[in-house]
Amino acid sequence: MFTSPKNGQNAEQQPMDENECYTSARQPSGGDPLARPPAAKSADQKEAEQRAAVDNAKSAKGGGLEELLGGQQPEAQSEPLQEGKGAAAGTLKGGMQQRPANAATKQQAVANTAAQQQQQEAQANAAHAQNLDAFKRAFSACMDARGCSVK
Protein backbone atom coordinates (compact mmCIF):
# COMPACT_ATOMS: atom_id res chain seq x y z
CA MET A 1 0.00 0.00 0.00
CA PHE A 2 1.26 3.43 -0.88
CA THR A 3 0.35 6.59 0.98
CA SER A 4 0.76 10.16 -0.05
CA PRO A 5 -0.33 13.44 1.49
CA LYS A 6 -3.33 15.02 -0.19
CA ASN A 7 -3.85 18.07 2.02
CA GLY A 8 -0.32 19.48 2.01
CA GLN A 9 0.96 17.65 5.12
CA ASN A 10 4.68 17.78 5.68
CA ALA A 11 6.90 14.76 5.04
CA GLU A 12 7.69 14.38 8.74
CA GLN A 13 4.06 13.89 9.78
CA GLN A 14 3.24 11.12 7.26
CA PRO A 15 5.44 8.36 8.82
CA MET A 16 3.96 9.08 12.24
CA ASP A 17 0.43 8.88 10.80
CA GLU A 18 1.28 5.63 9.02
CA ASN A 19 2.64 4.11 12.23
CA GLU A 20 -0.39 5.14 14.28
CA CYS A 21 -2.82 3.92 11.62
CA TYR A 22 -0.90 0.64 11.26
CA THR A 23 -1.15 0.00 15.00
CA SER A 24 -4.81 0.97 15.23
CA ALA A 25 -5.80 -1.08 12.14
CA ARG A 26 -3.88 -4.21 13.12
CA GLN A 27 -5.55 -4.82 16.46
CA PRO A 28 -9.27 -4.88 15.57
CA SER A 29 -8.86 -6.43 12.11
CA GLY A 30 -6.65 -9.33 13.15
CA GLY A 31 -4.69 -8.72 9.97
CA ASP A 32 -1.05 -7.80 9.75
CA PRO A 33 0.61 -7.28 6.38
CA LEU A 34 3.97 -8.05 7.96
CA ALA A 35 2.77 -11.47 9.17
CA ARG A 36 3.41 -14.42 6.91
CA PRO A 37 0.47 -16.34 5.50
CA PRO A 38 -0.20 -19.69 7.13
CA ALA A 39 2.42 -22.23 6.15
CA ALA A 40 1.30 -25.20 4.12
CA LYS A 41 2.09 -28.59 5.58
CA SER A 42 5.15 -30.30 4.20
CA ALA A 43 4.87 -33.45 2.12
CA ASP A 44 6.26 -35.42 5.07
CA GLN A 45 3.58 -34.04 7.41
CA LYS A 46 0.83 -34.84 4.92
CA GLU A 47 2.17 -38.35 4.39
CA ALA A 48 2.34 -38.97 8.15
CA GLU A 49 -1.28 -37.86 8.54
CA GLN A 50 -2.34 -40.15 5.70
CA ARG A 51 -0.48 -43.12 7.25
CA ALA A 52 -2.21 -42.39 10.56
CA ALA A 53 -5.58 -42.33 8.78
CA VAL A 54 -4.86 -45.71 7.17
CA ASP A 55 -3.81 -47.13 10.55
CA ASN A 56 -6.98 -45.76 12.14
CA ALA A 57 -9.09 -47.31 9.37
CA LYS A 58 -7.39 -50.67 9.93
CA SER A 59 -7.88 -50.60 13.70
CA ALA A 60 -11.49 -49.44 13.41
CA LYS A 61 -12.23 -52.25 10.99
CA GLY A 62 -10.59 -54.94 13.05
CA GLY A 63 -7.68 -57.15 12.29
CA GLY A 64 -5.94 -60.29 13.24
CA LEU A 65 -7.70 -63.63 12.72
CA GLU A 66 -11.03 -62.04 11.78
CA GLU A 67 -9.32 -60.14 8.95
CA LEU A 68 -7.57 -63.32 7.78
CA LEU A 69 -10.92 -65.10 7.72
CA GLY A 70 -12.38 -62.49 5.42
CA GLY A 71 -14.45 -60.78 8.09
CA GLN A 72 -15.86 -64.03 9.49
CA GLN A 73 -15.58 -65.16 13.05
CA PRO A 74 -13.51 -68.34 13.56
CA GLU A 75 -16.63 -70.23 14.69
CA ALA A 76 -18.34 -69.44 11.38
CA GLN A 77 -16.25 -72.02 9.51
CA SER A 78 -18.57 -74.98 9.25
CA GLU A 79 -17.03 -77.02 6.44
CA PRO A 80 -15.49 -80.27 7.62
CA LEU A 81 -11.85 -80.97 6.97
CA GLN A 82 -12.11 -83.24 3.93
CA GLU A 83 -10.18 -83.52 0.71
CA GLY A 84 -8.17 -80.32 1.16
CA LYS A 85 -11.17 -78.23 2.12
CA GLY A 86 -12.19 -76.87 5.46
CA ALA A 87 -11.02 -74.16 7.76
CA ALA A 88 -7.66 -73.64 6.06
CA ALA A 89 -9.22 -73.30 2.61
CA GLY A 90 -11.96 -71.08 4.02
CA THR A 91 -9.35 -68.90 5.66
CA LEU A 92 -7.44 -68.48 2.42
CA LYS A 93 -10.58 -67.85 0.40
CA GLY A 94 -11.92 -65.36 2.92
CA GLY A 95 -8.57 -63.56 3.07
CA MET A 96 -8.40 -63.33 -0.71
CA GLN A 97 -11.93 -61.93 -0.85
CA GLN A 98 -11.14 -59.39 1.86
CA ARG A 99 -7.98 -57.94 0.25
CA PRO A 100 -9.80 -55.72 -2.28
CA ALA A 101 -12.02 -54.34 0.48
CA ASN A 102 -8.97 -53.61 2.62
CA ALA A 103 -7.25 -51.84 -0.27
CA ALA A 104 -10.39 -49.79 -0.92
CA THR A 105 -10.56 -48.83 2.75
CA LYS A 106 -6.93 -47.68 2.67
CA GLN A 107 -7.48 -45.68 -0.51
CA GLN A 108 -10.58 -44.05 0.95
CA ALA A 109 -8.73 -43.13 4.15
CA VAL A 110 -5.90 -41.53 2.16
CA ALA A 111 -8.37 -39.67 -0.09
CA ASN A 112 -10.38 -38.40 2.89
CA THR A 113 -7.24 -37.21 4.66
CA ALA A 114 -5.95 -35.44 1.55
CA ALA A 115 -9.31 -33.71 1.09
CA GLN A 116 -9.33 -32.60 4.74
CA GLN A 117 -5.79 -31.26 4.40
CA GLN A 118 -6.72 -29.25 1.32
CA GLN A 119 -9.84 -27.90 3.00
CA GLN A 120 -7.89 -26.83 6.10
CA GLU A 121 -5.25 -25.07 4.00
CA ALA A 122 -7.94 -23.32 1.94
CA GLN A 123 -9.74 -22.17 5.09
CA ALA A 124 -6.53 -20.87 6.66
CA ASN A 125 -5.60 -18.98 3.49
CA ALA A 126 -9.11 -17.54 3.18
CA ALA A 127 -9.07 -16.37 6.80
CA HIS A 128 -5.65 -14.77 6.29
CA ALA A 129 -6.85 -12.97 3.15
CA GLN A 130 -10.00 -11.80 4.93
CA ASN A 131 -7.95 -10.40 7.82
CA LEU A 132 -5.63 -8.58 5.40
CA ASP A 133 -8.62 -7.05 3.60
CA ALA A 134 -10.02 -5.86 6.93
CA PHE A 135 -6.63 -4.38 7.81
CA LYS A 136 -6.40 -2.55 4.47
CA ARG A 137 -9.85 -1.06 4.91
CA ALA A 138 -9.12 0.07 8.48
CA PHE A 139 -5.69 1.46 7.57
CA SER A 140 -7.08 3.30 4.53
CA ALA A 141 -9.91 4.81 6.56
CA CYS A 142 -7.48 5.99 9.24
CA MET A 143 -5.07 7.51 6.74
CA ASP A 144 -7.91 9.15 4.82
CA ALA A 145 -9.14 10.73 8.04
CA ARG A 146 -5.64 12.18 8.49
CA GLY A 147 -5.67 13.67 5.01
CA CYS A 148 -3.58 11.10 3.16
CA SER A 149 -4.34 9.17 0.00
CA VAL A 150 -3.86 5.36 0.08
CA LYS A 151 -3.47 3.15 -2.99
Image: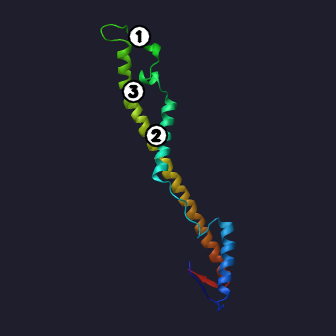
**Number of residue marks:** 3
Image coordinates for residue 51, horizontal then vertical, percent:
47, 41
Q: Secondary structure at mark 2?
A: helix
What type is the residue that disc 2 sits on? Answer: Ala
Mark 1 crowdedness (10 Å alpha carbons): few <14, some 14-19, many ≥20:
few
Q: Residue at x 65, y 66 (%)?
A: 29
What residue is shown with label 3? 98
Image coordinates for residue 92, horizontal then vertical, percent:
36, 20
Disc on the earlier residue, 3 or 1: 1
- In this rendering, is residue 20 above or below 30? below
Q: Residue at x 56, y 81 (%)?
A: 2
Q: Residue at x 38, y 24 (%)?
A: 95
* Residues marked 1 and 2 touching at CB (< 8 Å): no
What residue is shown with label 1? 78
- Taking the image as shown, residue 1 lies to the left or right of residue 98, namely right
- In this rendering, is residue 27 above or below 62? below
Specify the quadrant of the image occupied by residue 89.
top left
CA–CA distance in space, label 3 to label 1: 19 Å
Image coordinates for residue 114, horizontal then vertical, percent:
46, 47
Q: Residue furthest front?
A: 44
CA–CA distance in space, label 3 to label 2: 17 Å
Q: Which mark is residue 109?
A: 2
Looking at the figure, which quarter contains the N terminus? bottom right
Specify the quadrant of the image occupied by residue 20.
bottom right
Q: Secondary structure at mark 3?
A: helix
Looking at the figure, which quarter contains the C terminus? bottom right
Image coordinates for residue 129, horizontal then vertical, percent:
55, 64
Specify the quadrant of the image occupied by residue 101.
top left
Residue nearest the viewer, comparing 65 with 122: 65
Q: Residue furthest left?
A: 83
Residue nearest the viewer, comparing 42 with 67: 42
